[in-house]
Amino acid sequence: MLEPRVRELLCAVRDDARREGIQAEFSFHRERSSLIRLGNSAVALSTSEELTRFGVEVQDGRRIGSYSLTGDVTSAEPLRRALRKAAEICAASPEKEYEPIFGAVEETIDDSRGFDPALEAMPPEEKIGLCAKVIKTVGPGGAYEFSGSWTSGSTEYYYITTANDREAYRRLTDGRLVLAIQEQQRKWEIYSEQAGKDTAAFSAETAIAEFDSLLPIYESQPGWAPPLGNARVIFGPQAIGEMTMMAIWGGFIGRLYEEKQAYTSGKSFGEPLFSQQVSITDAPDHAGVYGMPFDFNGRRRRSFPLVENGAFRGLMYDTRTAAKYGKTPTGHDGAADLVFATGDAPAGRAAAFELAGEGLYIPYLHYVNMPEPSKGILTGSSRFNALCIEGGRPVSPLFSVRVTDSVVNMLSHVVAIASQPAFVDISTSYARRSPEALSVPEYLICDNVRISDRTETF
Amino acid sequence: MVTHYTEIAGVVNAELRRMTDAGCAFADARYFDESSNEYLMLYDGNLEGNGAEWERGIGVRVLYQGAWGFAATANLEAIPSCFDRALANGRAAAMLPGFPREMGPARPVTGRFRPPVERDPADVPLSEKLALMQDIDRALQAPHVAHRFVYLRTQRHHIYYWNSEGTEIDRLQVNPYGHLRVMATDAEGRAQRRTHELSSNGQGTRGFEALANDDAFGSHAERLKGELADLLAADALSPGRRSVILLPGQGWLQVHETIGHALELDRILGYERSFMGASHVKPEMIGTLRYGSDKLTCRAGVTPNSPGTFGYDDEGSPQREIVLIDKGLLVNVLSSRGDIAEVNAAAGKTVVTEPGNAARACAFYRPPIDRMPNVNIDPGQDGTLENIIEATEDGIILDYANSWSIGPNREHFHFGCELAWEVKDGVRTRVLKNPSYQGHTLEMWHALDMVGDSSTWRVAQVPNCGKGEPNQVMEVGHGVPVMRFGNVETGERS
């Protein structure tokens, strides 16, 4: 549970609100973050931040006001000031046309699964030592330039409201190590990524093995630019993660569906959307994701199917959308924990290439966006580690290509789904540390994927 | 409790001396006395976003044996220990040394910056802001409009900066952002929308009065409704190569993604390679690369009314105007002090003589990195938008992005836009929906064949440029005229 001194402060402010007859929700976020950034085979920056954030939302009938502060929340006065400010904003607000749903903690939760004190406190010297080993092993003599970063830290979430005395608390650690190397003449780039909840997720050997597996073909073969048009593509984990997020964002968000902006708008539950091999679930208890047990309206988050055997099964309604459209909130005031179910294809990249026979191996998609959400069309470009596959084996590195196609088309032309899952970290630290990950198959082979542009560079 | 500026300044200056005594070549501190945002979002008449954020704290950076250490805290009693952590981080970073960072000659400066503001948004009652939004929301209503969106955000940063060279800066930034949108679904079930964002002509003031200026903001409601109605009845753009005329509402994003980010020196040097990507520009190309046609002149401008104008950057360097691309030739890049020795060494010659002022940090808990300030395109000699249309045989006019995707080295791009107007034989003929275009950066800028005059030049106020590890969201500005590009790949082939 949250540190007693901070918990007492937050509960005291909740008690103040109750005494004053204010309906309020309180959220607390604390992060201990550190990062090293590598550039040109050296450590360019080492950082550490300890930050606390306090948020309060006041509701009075159909009026709502909110206020958050990042700063000193070690005494009650700033918290009381935030409560007063939120109440002022609420009082000045116009009424909504619908009745908002006030937050209440459904059940007390005290969850520290996935908290590793060693990862929280991992010193920069340890990270730098591991990176130095990779650089020394893979790039002796400065043949390559290494860039990368290694972030690690802990996050605490705490949520209470004046509706009851229950409390929801989550504490976890996360880390992500990425290393990219660029060859100095031909400028190709290859990449290694490791992420996880504890220190066991990181090793120099894993990064070295990834580079060793790709260097021979990158070193020996020129880049290749495929013809424009449709191609068989073997997507790797990060690309599947990007595609899954776009598929869910464009089709399974309640508000977009209700407002007819989703590519699923007009479809009913049970209708086929994708290949029968595709199942996607929001699964907070799954071991392969970070797992958020509650949302920021107090709901206990439970397994929530979105796509089952290719059929449309669920829509995610945050509280406000649910209130506006007369639906039941589904525990989605906050992040989801998406799990793309594995299939039955043999494990390993080599097996994927053999199975595909020929095609493009695209493990990463860069800067993915949706030009037409209502048709589910996404676009993004290949990046690191991409290969041309012929005769069941890689024959050359792939120059940068652009995929522009609908997720419906791509997920309807599934040739094979790997049986082995992969952990894909999609955390960002814009504004605050927010661990988030997907569990996806190690690879996904799709036919008829549209390649809309190409370059003759990496 | 340490709360007063003078107390904080005393503690910080003592700590800066302690850092140099401990062997740091340079140290600095940014104290955000106030960093606040107010968000108001009216969606279909309901106030769905109604909140404020407030931050206060200090970020400390030290340069130890050529490597940076950074630490931040919101606990103002803990400033000395924050310096200790930054020093420990710097010492750790120096374990794996690369090209030694150095700040060049000391440039101590004392300065103060205040933006041109008549009414500080913080002093405007919430009721007045809401009344403005509700008036605009009423104006957005129409039978064919399915959803309406009115968004106001005001931002205020009050920052004190000190460094070990004796620099002291007191800087205030006030940024108003406004956003209107109408949405509906067309007969084919596709969502269509039209958006207007508050912009300026670079002059005037940037307090609440900018949002209350009907010409700049609220009066566009009528135009948006009309254009949405046109979109609902429009045909889709058929794919093909044709001239593309970018209005400033789209042109700024073309500049941002394919010039601005590509010219950030930390990208060029490879420090973003594993994250947002590097750049197709290499150090040795500075001064020799033909980036575009001779119609293209681009500068890091000091535009009075823009969120990219801040007086002094987050290393204390005074903001000054820097030409980046001169009549198509790449002549400079967006740099900060610590980059200069490295880029010149990498180029094998002097390609950057004076550091720019692009070191920017979005919050007290983030270190400065190379960022765009205002990256502007000079107005041209090709007249008004109407003059450019008259000179166009086969083309489309594009406005406002609804999708953007850029290759990792900023080399190729794909943009989807809200709306296109077809141009045939010098006449704007009809509206086309679902427009998009894609291309390659240098080819695109070499295809720039007409640039509008100053009557077409608008400054986009961009609140959300994302970059860096740890991630940072920064406000930037782009002053852009109407621009025409020849023979561009447009539309989506099936």
Image (cartoon, coloured by chain):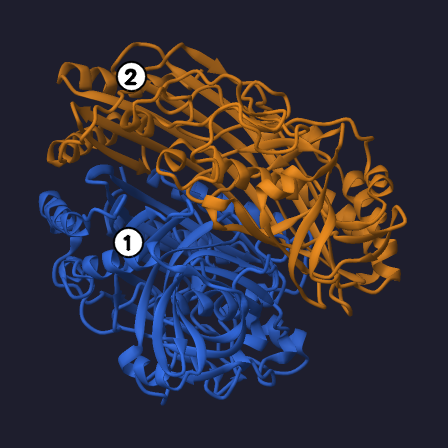
Chain colours: A orange, B blue
Category of crowding for the residue at label 2, using alpha-carbon neighbours closer than 10 angstroms: few (below 14), some (14–19), many (at least 20) = some
Q: Where is residue A428 in the image (x, y as percent from the top left)?
A: 51, 42
- As measured in the structure, the alpha-carbon distance from the residue carrying label 1 to the one carrying label 2 is 31 Å
Q: What is the chain letter for disc 1? A: B
Q: Residue at x 44, y 83 (%)?
A: B393
Q: Left or right of A159: which side holds A84? A: left
Horizontal arrangement in the rendering, residue A353 relative to residue B390 (left or right): right
Q: Tell me: A396 left or right of B129.
A: right
- The residue that label 1 is drawn on is B157
Q: Identify residue for label 2.
A: A11
Chain designation of label 2: A
Residue at figure coordinates x 41%, y 43% from the top left: A431
- Dot 1: element: strand
| Front-lying residue, B53 or B177 | B177
Q: Residue drawn 12% across and 58% down?
A: B119
Q: What residue type is labelled 2?
A: Cys
